[in-house]
Amino acid sequence: KEKGMLGPDPVYAQTMLRVKDPKKSLEFYQKLGMKFVAKLDINELDFSLYFLAYTNDTPMLPIDDGTERDRAGIAGWLWTRRYWTLELTHNYGTETKEDFSYHNGNVEPRGFGHIGILVDDIYGSCKKLEEMGYKIVRQPGPFAQIAEIAFVADPDGYWVELIKRHQYTETRAYSKPQ
């Protein structure tokens, strides 16, 4: 029985962010505990896609021997996952342009806002990130009687919301909706 316009079993697959320097961005998101799971080089269009996720899956990375794995095989593996991925898109050459930046959506004109990550220790997490040199945009604290939150900026200025995990919330792995 279909539950929506997309059929009986849609999966939220990814959120894409354009990044200036993939090395800096990969380092940041890996410090947040994400695992680098796949890379697709689209050389003929001058960009690469880097995928990260919170998972224990073995990464589907290109072979580093001068050849490329079949892109369709990597994409086929990636788009059978049942978890969300963060896709970092790097357009070649942006990392060398001193004055280049992407709009993060949190200044005029406003648009995209942030991604959110549940954490156990929001205060300790912010302290560690600040010690590593990352900018805490909003210090941790209560928000509208909903949760304790904080915001940290990634290397491109995109905001990552850290949300204190509620202690009473049952935690379990994703399961297919019934």
Image (spheres, rainbow, N blue to C red):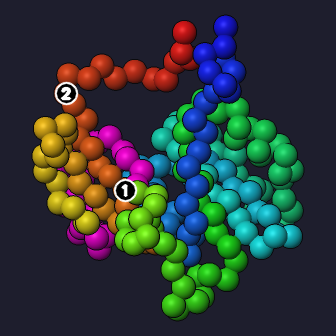
Q: How many marks?
A: 2
Left or right, 25 with respect to 97, comes to: left
Q: Quadrant of the C terminus?
A: top right
Q: Residues within 10 Å of mark 1 (few under 14, many from 20)?
A: many
- Is residue 127 highlighted in magenta? yes
Of residues 95 and 124, the one nearer the viewer is 95
Please tell me the numbered disc located at residue 167: 2
- Is residue 3 highlighted in magenta? no
The kind of residue on which mark 2 rests is: Gln
Q: In the picture shown, does residue 177 fall above or below 80?
A: above
Q: In the picture shown, does residue 168 fall above or below 144?
A: above
Residue 21, image x and y in percent?
Answer: 56, 75
For marks 1 and 2 on the same chain, the one whose residue lies earlier in the sequence: 1
Answer yes or no: is residue 92 visible: yes
Look at the image and give the residue range highlighted in magenta: 114-135
Q: Splitting the image into 4 quarters, where does residue 97 fall? A: bottom right
Mark in front: 1 vs 2: 1
Residue occupying image coordinates x 70% and y 32%: 80
Residue at the extreme front of the image, as rendered: 109
The kind of residue on which mark 1 rests is: Val
Residue occupying image coordinates x 84% and y 46%: 72
Q: Are marks 1 and 2 in contact (CB under 8 Å)?
A: no
Left or right, 47 with respect to 30, comes to: right
Residue 159, image x and y in percent?
Answer: 37, 61
Residue of label 1: 160
Of residues 156 and 36, the one nearer the viewer is 156
Q: Quadrant of the N terminus?
A: top right
